[in-house]
Each structure stands twice: as C-alpha cells, then as structure tokens.
Image: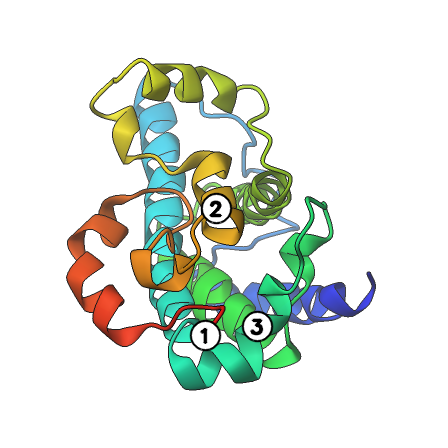
Amino acid sequence: RVRGYWLDPLIYAITYACSARRGAVVATNLAVGFWPSDSLELCSTVLTFVGMLLYFDFMSFLLHWAMHTRVLYRRYHKEHHDVRHLSPWANDIESDAEGLLNVFMCKATTVILAAWLGLLQERPWLIVAFYAFTKWYGVMEHLNMTLPPLHILLRWKQAGHPLCSLLSLPDYHDDHHRYSPDAEAVGHLAVYTTFWDRLFAPLVRRTTVAKLS
C-alpha cells in the first residue's frame, strides 16, 4: 500500500532539519560513535531510547483518544478500523489527515524534543533506531505477533510479573480492533503501556464512541 508511506520521506527530512539545530544530527561527524564506549554511556543511551518511547506512547495515546471521539472517528479514524483481518499493511491504513498528525504530533515531536534537550548529541543514530522500532512494532501489533525479543516480556506478563503488566504488547491492540464490541469506549488506546488507559479510563469512556454505533 503506497499511500500509507508518502509521508515518511517528508517527515524524516523535516525532523532531520529541526534536530540539527542542537547538533543532534551530524552525519559528517566521524567522531560520533555507534556503540556506547562504557557502561555509563550505555545506561544513558538506553534511558534516552526508553524515554523517547514513553513520550511517544503518551502522545500516541492522546491522538488515538482524540481519534475515537465521535466527530474525528467517523471522519478520519474509521478507515483504519474498517480493516477486519490481520495484515502487515493495516498499520499504515489511515486517512491522510491522521497520517500527518501521527508523524508530526507523535514521531517528529519525540525526536525534536530529545534533540533540543541535548539527548541525541552523541548518538544521532537513535533517531533511526526510534523510527525503525516504531514502524516494526506497529506492523507487529497489527499482525498480533509478539516477536523476539519481546516474546520474553509476554511470558513474564502472562506469568503475572507486576512490571510487565504495564506493557500493552500486540495482543492488547488486537483486542482493541477485534474482541471488544465497543473498543473505543473501553480503552486499549495506548501503544506500549497500559498506564494511560488505566489512568484516564473513566474520562475515555465518557468522551469516546462505540465503533459499531
């Protein structure tokens, strides 16, 4: 499906330009390493990447919540929910307006904020890692497949590990699409965690609509 990808080159170019303001993207700087040199830098790199994913999770939750309100759902988001089968392409089946909001409000702001905070100064390759992971995870959850290494987290979640209970994982989003008759009202809106769905559950129920109504 070509239509779902036309925004990607545009958003990469704009994000690159905005991030360069703080020197986050230095493609010609050969001094930039692609692997942390010590344990402290490794921890900093991991925390930066996790922080980017958590911010993206929150912004995606807000946008997804908005898309499940009555007006926006029928006008923009229904196209995505019209897909009733598992498919790697389902992740990118969305209206152009929703696609723009996704890449600018969620993905671009994540990278730009991290760059302006100076978190990408020595590791600009995290931008590529972030975009690659979000795309891979989106395809994976619309296939309802938990691929390695995340299958380990799924086992821990099924075993009742308290921390892993906060992870959504692909089956959580698949429930949102298939098994809840009023998925918009009951939540399952976040991408990586269940925290925001739990925190805002009462408000989400009052402000969203059932997709079959």
Looking at the image, tell me whether mark 3 or mark 1 is earlier in sequence order: 3
Residue 212 on image: x %, y %: 49, 69
How crowded is the residue under tag 3: few (<14 C-alpha within 10 Å), some, or many (20+)? some
Q: CA distance from mark 1 to mark 2?
A: 16 Å
Q: Earlier in the sequence, mark 1 or mark 2?
A: 2
Which of these two is toward me, 141 or 149? 141
Q: Is residue 163 above or below residue 133?
A: above
Q: Please say if 155 is above or below 71.
A: above
Judge left or right: residue 143 versus residue 157.
right
Q: Residue 157: image x %, image y %? A: 34, 21
Q: Nearer the viewer, mark 3 or mark 1?
A: 1
Residue wearing tag 3: 78
- Residue for point 37% across, 73% down: 209
Which percent across, then down, holds residue 152? Answer: 45, 15
Q: Quadrant of residue 201?
A: bottom left
Task: Kindly identify which residue carries mark 1.
Answer: 213
- Asked whether the viewer can see residue 107, the reply is yes
**Residue occupying image coordinates x 49% and y 65%:** 108
Q: Quadrant of residue 193?
A: top left
Alpha carbon of mark 3 to alpha carbon of mark 1: how far?
12 Å
Q: Read off the residue under disc 2.
A: 179
Disc 1 element? loop
Residue drawn at x 60%, y 31% is 145
